[in-house]
Amino acid sequence: MHRKIALKPLNLILFLLTIVSYGKEQDHGHEASNSGKTTEAEVKEYIQHHLKDSYDFNLFSYKTDAGEEKHVGFPLPVILWDNGLKLFSSSKFHHGETVAEVDGSYYKLYHSKIYKVASPDGEIIEDDHHHPINEKPLDFSITKNVVMIFMVFAIMFFMFRRMAMAYKKNGRMPKGLGRFLEPIVLYVRDEIAIPNIGEKHYKRYMSYLLTVFFFVWIVNLFGLTPIGMNLTNNIAVTLCLALITYFITTFSGNKNYWKHIFWMPGVPVPMKIILAPIELLGTFIKPFALMIRLYANITAGHVVLMSIIGMVFLLENWLGSSLSFLLAFVLGILELLVAALQAYIFTVLSALYFGMAVEEHDHH
């Protein structure tokens, strides 16, 4: 339901952007800005930049009086395997404007991907469908999303270590940060783990449930910052989280779990043969739904919010800009709730799958 609701405002925003774009073209005669880009193009580029991963950690950018664009941030290591290990700094790409030369080979950053080119000119060869056909080396680079994963790991390690040390020093009484974390931990245990998994088995899964809840929640909150660190907007990240849930469910499944998949008790034999492939397919659909639900909801929310913020710059009157700012503020507050809600849903569904895997049935 949430995904359908999120896409309707997106269509409305795109429609409004089209109207504004048409009006500005009529008023300004298709004139571009000093940098050669229209305001609409700059807004679209900023939205794409906010959503995509990158090979450098760009905090913000600004334009000088001379029209030169300056980036404030720091480069990240690029690690490629192309007839051997190639290790260099992403600063060689100069934000995609130059070709990097490493040990006599040339690499170009094109649409957020690294391609091998034949010369310093950096020519990208495309097929009839405008897809690059240049060779792509194996890429193991430390991108902004990877840095974000390490940052969240450090934050979570610091929080829970401080909480554990406080418990030891104060006779199992929370103190400081633990007073904030303890109600959340107890909520995950009492309202998510125990009801869905059961008293007998829930402790085996508490570590993962707490980890995935706080991980998704924290990265969703970071995704709302102007820096644009959107881990859950990367389908590869949500795929890995869903796969972990899938593997834990699969290897935790008891004989009753597999029996209800391949040979359901109380069902006629012909129906068992028909339903077994469907039930087996369902074991793959569940983690797929986890992946798509988290990815689609977070992506749709970011696109809508960034589009409305962009309208502040597109509507050149105080009424339109004020309304856009007010709507962006309200949606920003809503996104804070969605950040926690998506973490909750992912954790609840994971616990539900674990509970189905370890559930014990008594057949008489």
Image: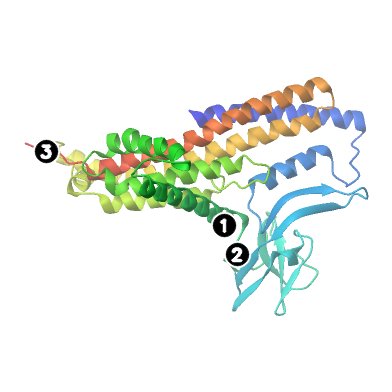
Label 2 or label 3, whichever comes before in sequence order: 2
Tell me the residue that label 3 is attached to: 362
Whether pointer 1 and pointer 2 mark residues with C-beta atoms closer than 8 Å, the reply is yes
Observer-nearest of 341 and 183? 183
- Quarter-of-image position of residue 308: top right
Question: For residue 141, which numbered disc appears in the image?
Answer: 2
Give the side of residue 34 with respect to residue 315, left or right: right
**Is tag 3's residue or tag 1's residue first in the polypeptide sequence?**
1
Q: Quadrant of residue 213?
A: top left
Badge nearest the viewer, 1 or 2: 1
Residue at 28% over, 46% down: 203
Q: Name the disc covering residue 272, or none.
A: none
**Residue labelled with disc 1:** 146
First along the sequence among labels 1 and 2: 2
Q: Nearer the viewer, residue 200 or 278?
A: 200
- Residue 48 location (% of width, % of height): 69, 45
Q: Amino acid at mark 2?
A: Ser
Assign a secondary structure to mark 1: helix
Query: Distance of mark 2 from mark 3, alpha carbons?
Result: 52 Å
Q: Work out whether residue 216 or residue 317 is closer to the camera in this orientation and state it.
A: 216
Relative depth, front residue between 166 and 103: 166
- Residue at the location (10% across, 38% down)? 363
Please, which residue is most extreme toward the front here? Answer: 170
Give neighbour class at mark 2: few <14, some 14-19, many 20+ (Cα, 10 Å): some
Looking at the rendered structure, the kind of residue marked 1 is: Val
